[in-house]
Image: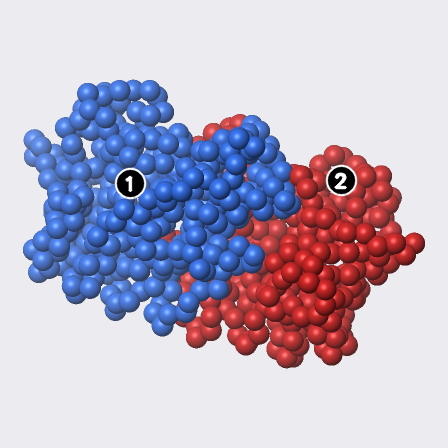
Chain colours: A blue, B red
């Protein structure tokens, strides 16, 4: 159901008059009002985005509300396959989807460095608008601050999100059961490698594009179909390994993975080898891991694979009944090793 | 109903081991988990703050939800009368209160500069916790990012907030009527002067403390008492003047103020004169302007003045029936002038 949601009109703020963001654009006065009206309100246009109030009054629904927030500091701001705006909207949509909630409302807080290109800000706002429309969420409230040159880095964006849980499942680590299958929705490592390549000016044979994408639609299709999902997690900072170790430690069970089953594209595997990285620690922005009982495996994979971006969905391991709180991985030569959480920092400012 | 809500225990993160924030504290790995558990979860402790999930599932209520966000970039981080943490919680509480909503849930997103003092971060988190308890809101979800040294400035905080409207009033500029009285809840200009003094190392005869305070409790008392409030606005960036001009332009009416009635402390007035500022443009963090019909004036002032911080509440002007969208002020010598919105930047990073 991807639609062409392009915001086609030009930036209403005269870019010739204001080629750069000034400190005064964060000052609460005329310039800030112009900026909000001509960039953010223009890009996010929706009936609940009442720019004359600091808050948005939401349409109440009867389901359980879910609330999340993330700040985005990715560098560079624009990268193959996405930009900080797309990431800021999709990342928060995905956090809500991981609770099994239907994303509905998003707030956007901008911390802009004095001197930042106004045109870039417009591109980012437009990209946020496009991502919001694609997932049928509304950006309903926002805030703009400007910090002095050298005290920020282009733009940082915070989004908070509200979604609603429409089902009866309890999707969390404690719901995981022995025998559950562990499923990923496709190849790993593209976002991290795309950012690293863009930042360091590396070039690989093929251009690597971030996998940044919204996860809510297919997750909700799974839930609507009654698939019994025990736990989900998006595989961002720290990658698959860190997410699984964290979940294993919370639920206290053992997850046994098979390295040969973990999908990694050949070019990504090659880039990881050159850079000395293990793809299971590399960040993704459109990938998730999902725990479900074996009985639902076939049905779940069928639905997952019907999403074009998820065609490579597959089982990569199982939950065993050992009470251990660890993740193990059987390698291609048959040896088994303990998978640890990412220690330290693999790549700062990946999201 | 102010209680002693001090978070008394020490920071659970060993400050000797981690005197400074490292880039790895934002890396999604072990250090980030330690930081979240030992600083934020420790400070914000509440049953809905489920640190094992990225979102918070909220207790649903039947009233209309209200959603807001603000980023805080105030500099310096600690100032007489408050700090960035207190400001980040109270500021968002106040935005919700200005809609007549009861603040309930807050999210907290931190963008920390590599090398920032961990002890300062703990003090800020503790201060947020104290502010949240004072207003009976819960900080239910959060996010931590670290940016490289020289790409941030200590710490920036975004808070988003959810509140619930429990009354039937429509509190917004369009509800303002000719004949309404314009009321402020006390003396103006203290936050701006406190920040300026702290930043520039100015000292005045008496120490000027920020007026930073939560506004929700007394606002809700007014609404519970059935006071007919037409519109409210907190007087932050841009001060009283910018808020009133913005509201006048939206509702298209004329507001006539009397300069002699506007409460400004003598030391603040003196500081403003030295600095060449007009106190009606100086930022506040515990002050609001309120529009109400004359028939409710007495009752409203009585309730407002029963709040110790609001004892100097008073009528400063009136809405006249001219359709003009302007604010005028009669000066001490009887002349009338047009009040304009703040143009440009009076003091960057005031909140």
Residue at mark 1: A212
Residue nearest the viewer, comparing B307 with B253 = B253
Check the image and report above or below for B347 versus A278: below
| Badge 2: chain ID | B
* Residue pictured at 69% horizontal, 59% vertical: B324
Residue nearest the viewer, comparing A253 with B209 = B209
Q: Is residue A259 in view?
A: yes
Res. B146 mark:
none
* Residue pictured at 47% horizontal, 73% vertical: B63
Measuring from the top left, give residue A332's x and y in whole percent. 9, 32
> Are callouts 1 and 2 both on one chain?
no
Apparent side of residue A143 relative to residue B209 in the rendered image (left or right): left
Residue at mark 2: B197
Check the image and report above or below for B22 versus B59: above
Check the image and report above or below for A122 versus A141: above
Q: Around disc 2, counting alpha carbons within 10 Å, would you say few (fewer than 14), some (14 to 19), or many (20 or more)?
A: some
């Amino acid at each position: 159901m991807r639609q062409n949601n392009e915001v086609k009109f030009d930036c209403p703020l005269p870019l010739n008059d204001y080629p750069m963001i000034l400190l005064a654009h964060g000052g609460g006065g005329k310039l800030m009002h112009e900026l909000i009206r001509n960039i953010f309100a223009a890009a996010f246009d929706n009936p609940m985005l009442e720019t004359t109030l600091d808050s948005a009054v939401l349409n109440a629904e009867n389901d359980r509300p879910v609330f999340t927030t993330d700040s985005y500091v990715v560098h560079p701001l624009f990268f193959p396959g996405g930009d900080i705006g797309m990431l800021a909207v999709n990342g928060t949509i995905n956090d809500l989807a991981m609770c099994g909630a239907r994303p509905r409302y998003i707030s956007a807080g901008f911390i802009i460095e004095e001197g930042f290109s106004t045109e870039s800000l417009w591109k980012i706002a437009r990209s946020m608008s496009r991502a919001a429309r694609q997932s049928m969420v509304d950006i309903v409230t926002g805030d703009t601050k400007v910090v002095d040159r050298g005290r920020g880095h282009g733009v940082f964006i915070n989004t908070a999100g509200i979604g609603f849980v429409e089902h009866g499942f309890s999707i969390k680590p404690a719901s995981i059961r022995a025998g559950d299958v562990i499923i990923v929705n496709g190849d790993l490592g593209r976002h991290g490698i795309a950012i690293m390549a863009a930042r360091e000016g590396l070039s690989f044979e093929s251009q690597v594009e971030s996998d940044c994408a919204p996860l809510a639609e297919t997750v909700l299709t799974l839930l609507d179909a009654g698939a019994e999902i025990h736990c989900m997690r998006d595989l961002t900072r720290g990658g698959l390994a860190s997410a699984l170790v964290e979940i294993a430690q919370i639920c206290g069970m053992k997850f046994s993975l098979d390295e040969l089953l973990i999908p990694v594209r050949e070019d990504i595997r090659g880039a990881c080898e050159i850079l000395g990285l293990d793809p299971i620690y590399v960040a993704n922005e459109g990938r998730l891991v999902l725990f479900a009982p074996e009985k639902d495996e076939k049905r779940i994979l069928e639905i997952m694979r019907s999403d074009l971006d998820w065609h490579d969905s597959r089982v990569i391991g199982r939950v065993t009944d050992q009470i251990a709180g660890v993740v193990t991985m059987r390698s291609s030569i048959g040896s088994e090793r303990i998978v640890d959480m990412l220690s330290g920092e693999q790549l700062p400012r990946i999201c």
